[in-house]
Image: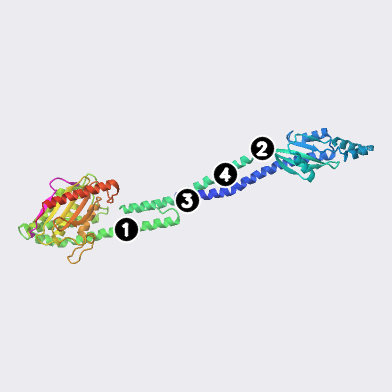
Amino acid sequence: MRWALVKVSLAVTAMVVVAFAVPLGLVVREMARDRAFSNAEREAAAVAPALSITTDREQLERVVAAAGSDDAAIAVHIPATGDGTDGGDGGDGGGGTEGDRAGGAAGGAAGGFDIGPERAAAEDIAAVRRLGRASTTQVPDGSVLLQPVALSSGAIAVVEVYVPESEVSNGVGTAWAVLAAVGAALIVGSVAVADRLGVRMVQPARRLAEGAQDLGEGKLGVRVPEEGPPELRSAAVAFNSMADQVVQLLANERELAADLSHRLRTPLTVLRLNAASLGEGPAAEQTRAAVEQLEREVDTIIRTARDARPQTAAAGPGAGCDAAEVVRERMGFWSALAEDEGRTWRVAGADRPVRIPVARADLAAALDALLGNVFRHTPEGTAFAVDVHNAEDAVIVLVSDAGPGIPDPGAAMARGRGSGSDGSTGLGLDIVRRLAESTGGDVRIGSSVLGGTEVRIWLQLDGRAAPVRRGHRGAVRRRRLRGAVRTVRTFNRSRSLP
């Protein structure tokens, strides 16, 4: 937006400057030309009174020298009167004093003469003398003004004033330079003003965008300053109000979760007392262990709900857990129930440490959700297996069974959408999905080599939350991942459970 405003201001100001500067420059040039020819007319007018009185060469030379700004600027062309038209009349009138003066003047002009350098063509001079009006004509390096003047004898003399080209364009270049400087200053000033206005508009919009991004990343305390144009101030007010409502809703949700979990403590206490009275035996020990684990989970939920800071499943650098150890522990817990129901089970790949950037409790909850689904949705005696594969940049956990399978994997992955007939809510698979996505991985449901369902959990080791991959590196990773899954599936097929 900022650069758009600058470009618009630059275009508009440039058009205005051109629209005014070009005509003004032409007017300045025309004014300089008019000034030069006005000076020439004034010099010619200074010679005209002397020509109307006398045509004596010496006197006219003194007049021309006094009137012209340059010795070679003015020329006077006296016509020839040798045909006696004017000169004879003047001679016959020599009897009186005034007649002698007129006759002398006419006699001096009888042969005709020129004073000063002649630049105009003879045809142009003759045309001015014949028409009786002033005119201008072009000559090398300038122009000349030809001004007709009537002599006392009735003949027409022509005063020629030379106007050099430098005089015609005197001051035009300077005026044009000043106009260009003023135009450039106007353009620069308008661009600077538009840039400041753009900054005033863009900065609040940028702060609003950054605040929305921070809020999306979980920074609930972010607020946007209410500044800028009225529209952006209104948007900032609405954003801050929305952020306050989000914080309030999350606080209400935490309080509700804590309250609901706290209410579970009373029936859990009764259940723990009843489990303690079961006596000895594998089933009793398993029941008591399950009650203790349920109590721990309820306590964890209460503490997490009371904590105002956002909780994430992924651990920081250097944290996490050993996936192989968690798998062995949880399989040890579920193995007792599997033996009671006559299920065959197997664990592969959990014989060496496998570090993952996931909290131990979160991975245990995800495994319990998947194994609980196996016991809940498959008949007794159905075999199942858990496989762990440590790839170069990811850890793959496969939970497969020999049950009837899942007809609609997409619906099973949707949070809160279950079949309804078996009491499934879909929350277990959603827990697994959120755990995988917290590391940048994902969860896939397919068919296992045992004939039932296979749930593949991909946990990315570098912790990047960008599961979409394109290009060569993404293709290489997908090929490695498919190769790792094929390796695990081949291992399962070679050791298929009955």
Q: Mark 1 — residue?
A: 246
The answer for how far apart the CA atoms under marks 4 and 3 are is 22 Å
Mark 2 vs 4, N-terminal side: 2
Residue shown at 63%/41% (left/top)? Answer: 172
Q: Residue 470: horizontal and vertical position, in percent?
A: 29, 49
The stretch drawn in magenta includes residue 345: yes
The secondary structure that dominates the magenta segment is: loop
Mark 3 vs 1, N-terminal side: 3
Along the viewing direction, whichever of 356 and 259 lies nearer the viewer? 356
Disc 1 residue type? Val
Q: Is residue 91 above or below residue 286?
A: above
The answer for how far apart the CA atoms under marks 2 and 3 are is 44 Å
Disc 2 residue type? Ser
Foreground disc of the pair 2, 3: 2
Foreground disc of the pair 2, 1: 2
- In the picture, measured across the screen, residue 206 lies left or right of residue 56, that is left
Q: Residue 367: horizontal and vertical position, in percent?
A: 17, 54
Q: Residue 19: horizontal and vertical position, in percent?
A: 58, 49
Using the rendered view, name the quadrant where residue 108 is placed: top right
* Region of the chain picked out in magenta, as a range: 341-355
Mark 2 vs 3, N-terminal side: 3
Along the viewing direction, whichever of 50 and 474 lies nearer the viewer? 474
Return the mark for residue 166: 2
Q: Mark 4 — residue?
A: 182
Residue shown at 62%/42% (left/top)? Answer: 175
* CB-based contact (under 8 Å), mark 3 and mark 1: no
Using the rendered view, name the quadrant where residue 34 is placed: top right
* CB-based contact (under 8 Å), mark 2 and mark 4: no
- In the picture, measured across the screen, residue 465 lies left or right of residue 338, that is right
- In the picture, measured across the screen, residue 446 lies left or right of residue 344, that is right
Q: Mark 3 — residue?
A: 5
**Quarter in which the C terminus is drawn:** bottom left
